[in-house]
Structure formats: structure tokens, C-alpha cells
Amino acid sequence: MEHHSFPTWQDVASDLVATAAGRASADLVLIHARVVLVQTREVMEGWQVAVKQGRFAYVGPDASHCIGPETDVQDLGNRYLIPGLCDGHMHIESGMLTPAEFTRAVIPHGTTSMFTDPHEIANVFGLRGVRLMHDEALMQPVNVFTQMPSCAPSAPGLETTGYEIGPEDVAEAMAWPGIVGLGEMMNFPGVVNGSQQMLAEIAATQDAGKTVGGHYASPDLGPAFHAYAAGGPADDHEGTCEDDAIARMRQGMRSMIRLGSAWYDIESQITAITERGLDPRNMIICTDDCFAKTLVEDGHMNRAVRHAIDCGCDPLVALQMATINTATHFGLEREIGQIAPGRRADMIVTSDLNTLPVEIVYGRGVKVAEAGECLADCPHLDWPEDTRASVHLGKALTAQDFEIRSDAAQVTANVIGVVENQAPTKALRLDLPVRDGVVEPDGIAQIALVERHRGTGGVTNALVSGFGYGPGMAMASTVAHDSHHMIVVGTDREMMAKAAMRLGEVGGGVTLWQDGAERALVELPIAGLMSDRPATEVAAKVTGLVHAMTAAGCTLNNAYMQHSLLALVVIPELRISDLGLVDVRAFELTEVIV
């Protein structure tokens, strides 16, 4: 495995000084630029930028003294030059792509730095899986930093993962070259209740001088929230309203506001800046989860920044939230996030600061994209064969495995209620009929969690409402945050069995069956989470899946994300795990039939 070679500031300091002084020639000079300085929130008309060894050497009104016979001089025609965009919190696996293909997909959208938490693969392959993601990340032509996952399982005692992460794993990873901190601390009840394992992971991160990511998925801003803040997380992305953002910033945390494929939390929180007038330095824009389809059709961080601007944010403030604020948060303000001497020459050429068309992208001083096309090589890791064989069902599943049985004529059941465009669910209670000893989910759907890590043959059954599916269908996915067993949702138990068995056959992914036939398939052979095919190919298959979901009766926006989150046992109110139905309000197992 080869890391993408890039010199440190120490390696090239003398070259940078000599170039800025005019004693040496720059590699690249950009002229007639409107340079956006996010560090001062200014636009400098007619400034020029000189790049040497992949870093900014000179940023000022006249770089003519930096130009030599071999210097590449580019006239920007009075267009804006802005720093490359930074995504402060995201999961590559959610794009259904490997780090290489995710990077290839986002470079044309101007994302040049990503802070990734590979806790999805950590649940499947443990520390080894994290290392594989980390190693491929370091091979890329832009900056893909890794946060060591903190919570596998996310809620000990409520789910079983393929592997577990402990303090010793965190301490080991802190010495890896691309690790910048601890991934989101999802086990917030553990922190609040003084879990020594959670506090040891935070301590190992702080001992290494790195950043602790937060995840406080509760509306309670009372003592529990304050206890969580005291536990050390430096940021949080789970806020959904203005009060959430303000509470986090008042406690010295960075409020990360997200726009992903299913997260629409910017509009409701950015008012803390646009209307309440709080200092924007403690607010960061991120995506959290973006599907390949979103990346191909709508964009990445450029989409999120545009949305913040559309919500009334000053464009320069929005850019700060996606560049320098992020860099400062991770202690990398001397490396990325601004156009200034010594920093990596990551930059975007755009003709408009409001609509933010990404016309040219430079990564480390090299043109890596133009007119929406990635020009850079994004190397692939040679993924081991066992990472492509991670779905172990243990037995042939049949319709009977998906029955919920009762001796009554009618039951009152606890039902997971899906909420459109939000991660939280509702805890519903519905009366349902029983026919021939089997509960029939009339008007709603069944949900099952199929164990797939150890081949136990285990199936946990429950009920879910909100998808709107009609009869005769089932959809199965091995993307099942965060334990990543297999989630099957359906209105026909025979189709549920066929969908589950199909994913065992192809090694993971997503499949939808209706009326006896497969209607869509997205193969995700690596860990059952990712494809190493290009984003355009994966997006086309996801589009087919979306059409199949619509044909089956689902009208929810980004319903697949809702599907994949139904096993995330740290977000209220009801979830499903391999151990049963989980009441996240109380952090305990509960019965399906009341």
C-alpha cells in the first residue's frame, strides 16, 4: 500500500520562502483572481496566488516576482478563488462507495478535505476494517482524514456487532498517520452515566492531542446534556433546531449542521447565526451521509453551502463554516481551510459566490477537476477476499422465519413509526388482527433483523409504519446502521425470505422483490456496505431501486435512508436489533406485542 506522496511544510519551507521572496520560481501562478479570504471574510479584487510544491507560497496583489520560465500562469478572468471545501463529519460507506470512488465522485464538487468516521465497517470487521479504510484514504490526491470509530457496538447490551471496539483499539489507532481524532461518541448514555470504557476512549484521544467527535441524539438539554458536554466531545451534529445549535455552542462545542441525502438540519439551526447573531466561528457545515445518487445528481459540500446561502446566510460566512471553521476545529488551520501561505493549495474557481458553480478544482496545487470531470487518479486498495464474503446467514430462510405469532384474535403492538427526513422514529401502538395464529400487519409492514455476521440463523421480527408499501413486496439491505446485520421490510413474508436469501447469494447490498420477482438490486460486495464501481454506476442502480420502491407504494423522500437506520439503537424512539425491539427512550428491550 502506497500513501499518496505529499511534502510537509517542514519539507518545503525553504522553497516557499524563496518563492515568496522572488528568489525561486513558482510552479503555478493564478492571476486576475477575486481571492476569498475566509480568515478575514474579505474578497480581494485582482489578487494573485503563487503555488510551490503543492502549497501556497504567495497570496497578494502582485505575484509577478514569483514567475519564472517554467511557471504555469493561469488567468482566472476575474473569477472567484475560494478554499477547497471541508466536510467536517461524514461516513464514506454511506455513499455505498469505497474511499477511492467516493473521492472521485466529490472532487468535481469542490470537496478537497473530508473527516471520515468509518464506524460502519468497524461493526463488520473491527479495527482491521478501519485500517483498510484509513489506508485507501491516504492514497487519494486530496485530504481524506480518518476518525477512529468509538462505538462498536453503539449501545452495548442492546445489539451484537461483528466486532467490538475498545479503548486499546482507540489508543493503537491514535498513532496511525491519518487519524485525526475519535469518531462520534454515539453511546451518550454511557458517557452520561460515567462508563469507564467510553471515558477511557475519550481519554486516549485527548492524550494524543486529537479531537473527540460527539453524537448527542436526545432532545433533553438538561443535566444529561451538560454531563455529556463535560465528558469531552468537542462537536455534535445531532441537533435539529435552533435551541440545539445554541446549547452546543454555549457549552464550548462546535455545532455541526448537516445537509446529507436524508438530513435537512441546516435551515432550522442556521438561524442561530442569521437571526440570533451568534458568533459563527463555532458552527460547521457537514453532510454526515450522502448516497452515490446524491453525489452524482446534486453535489456534496457545494450543495450544502448553497443551501446555507439559500437559507439567508452570508456567502462568506457559509464558506467559513465549510472551510476554516472545520480546519481550526481539528487543529489543521496551518494545513487546510484557507488561502494563505504555507497551507495546502486546495482551491476552487467559481464565477458566483451565491450559486457556487464549481468550475475548476485544485488539490494540493494540481488541477484535479474541471467542468464537472475528475482529472485525478484515485487509487484503489487491493481489498482482501474475505472482505467480499461477509454475509453469513447460517441457514435457508423461509416465510415461517418472519412470522410474529400470537394465540389471541387481535393484539396491540408496539410499532416503529418512520418520520420523513428525520432520523428519530415514533413509538406507535396499533391494534392488529391475528389469522391462523400469525399477526397480520394490515396497512403497515413487517420489519426483521437478520443476523449476518456469525451465521446464527437468527431473525428478530417487529412492525413498522410509514413507508406506505402495498401488498406483495419486500426490501432487504445489509446496510443496517450501525451493527450492519440485515434489515428486511415487507408486506409479504415469502418475499422477505427471498430478498434475504438473495443478499446472501450476492454478498450484500440492497434488493427489492415484488410479486415473486426481483425488481431492483444494488450489489455492495465489500463488507456488505460498499461497491468499488464508479459512483455513476452505483447511482444508476440506486435510481432503479428508488423507482422500484415507488412502484411498491413508497412515497417518502429518501426512504432508503430511513430503512437503513431502523437498527440504529441510539436514536429514539423505537429501533430493532438482533436482540429484539429496543425502546431507545429507556435504553432497554421491549416486547412487540403489548
Image (cartoon, grey):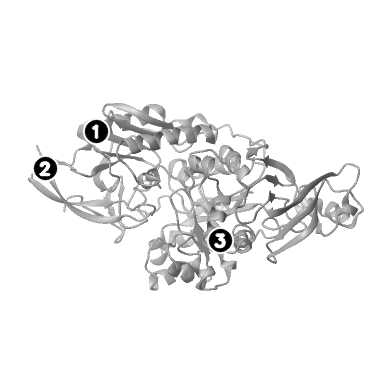
Residue at screen point 57% across, 37% down: 101
- Specify the quadrant that holds the N terminus: top right
Q: CA distance from mark 2 to mark 3?
A: 50 Å
Helix, strand or loop at label 3? It is strand
Sequence-wise first label, 2 or 3: 3
Which badge, 2 or 1, comes first in the chain's sequence? Answer: 2
Q: Position of residue 494 (x, y in %)?
A: 23, 31
State the quadrant of the C terminus: bottom left
Label 1 neighbourhood size at 10 Å, few (<14), some (14-19), many (20+)? some
Is disc 2 placed on a helix, strand or loop? Answer: strand
Q: Secondary structure at mark 1?
A: loop
Residue, disc 3: 284
Label drawn at residue 394: none
Location of residue 379 in the rendering, given as x and y in whole percent from the top left corner: 63, 35
Q: Amino acid at mark 2?
A: Val
- Residue of label 2: 434
- Mark 2 or 1: in front is 1
268, 279: nearer the viewer: 268
Q: Residue at x 50, y 40 (%)?
A: 292
Asked whether 464 or 309 is in front, the reply is 309
Residue marked by disc 1? 472
Instruction: Give the spatial CA distance, label 1 vs label 3.
Output: 44 Å
